[in-house]
Every structure is written in C-alpha cells, then in structure tokens.
Amino acid sequence: MVSATRHGERYCTAVSNGRVQLYADTSKNGVGGAAGMRPHELLESALAACVCMSIDMAAEKAGFTLPAIVVEVVVDRRDSETCFNVTVRDIAALVDEQRELVRAAVLGSPVARTLGKPVRVALETGSEAGALCRP
C-alpha cells in the first residue's frame, strides 16, 4: 500500500510506502512543480525500475553478466489508449541470445504485465473498506 499526503507548497505531495518517502509535484498555471516528479513520471519510473530489475534477474538466472543498461520510459497518453514506450540503451554489444533475454524481460516484467491489462480505478471512502475491485 502507498499513501499520499499534501505537503508544504501547493500541489507538493509526500508519497510513502511506510518505509520510504518521496515527493511528487505538478505545475498548473505557474504554481507548483519544483518539489518532485510529476504523477505520470512516477508511472514511467515504476515501469523503468521494474524493467531494469527484471533484466538483472533474467540475466542472473541465465548466467549472463550484462553491462550497465539504461532503461528509459515515456508515456504517450492518447484518447483511445495509453502507450508506455520503453527504450533499453547500451545493448548493441550484446549477442542475439542476450538481446532476446532483454526483450523477454521487458515484456514480462511485472509492472509491464500489470499495465498491459485493462485497468480500473475504484474509490473507497472509508465506510466501504474491503469492497474495492472485488469480483
């Protein structure tokens, strides 16, 4: 579970999982924007981090030692769909088997799989505890 609390400057939000805290922010009409990543950047960072970890785990399992790899994610919010464009940098020197491992790790990462499914947002107001996203 993650919680978010308004914090200090307008639009600044403290986000915590109970162990680690970070700040998110946005800018509207010249207000806010300097305290942390924008919410969509947090989505991009979740996918980028998960992909990076998934590549490391897949390489370790396959017995490969890969060079440092940079994963970049850009979200493209369209009217009919949202597309997360993932770029893995510095893989040109990899052999075909390693590039395929990277490709499979990107597509199979837990966050990529989660974002690849239909998503809905359910609101709980306190009195409905436990009623969310139930079949």
Image: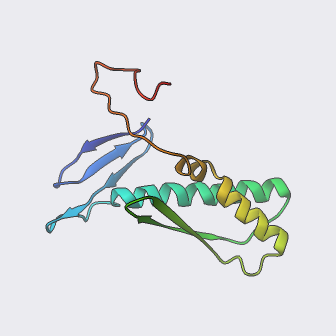
At x 33%, y 53%, the residue is: 23
Q: Position of residue 127 (x, y in %)?
A: 28, 18
Q: In the shown orientation, is residue 15 left or right of residue 57?
A: left
Task: State whether residue 41 is above or below residue 4.
Answer: below
At x 47%, y 25%, the residue is: 134
- Looking at the image, the residue that sits furthest to the front is 80
Q: In the shown orientation, is residue 131 left or right of residue 48?
A: left
Q: Residue 66 or 41: which is nearer the viewer?
A: 41
What's the colour scheme?
Answer: rainbow
Q: Residue 131 or 39: which is nearer the viewer?
A: 131
Q: Is residue 32 visible?
A: no
At x 61%, y 48%, the residue is: 110
Report how many numbered discs are placed on residues in the image.
0
Q: Position of residue 108 (x, y in %)?
A: 68, 53
Query: In the picture, which quadrant includes the N terminus?
Result: top left
- Looking at the image, the residue that sits furthest to the bottom is 92
Task: State whether residue 94 is above or below residue 35.
Answer: below
Q: Is residue 97 visible?
A: yes
Q: Residue 87 or 64: which is nearer the viewer?
A: 87
Residue 121 occupies quadrant? top left
Residue 24 occupies quadrant? bottom left
Q: Position of residue 102 (x, y in %)?
A: 72, 64
Q: Position of residue 9 (x, y in %)?
A: 17, 55
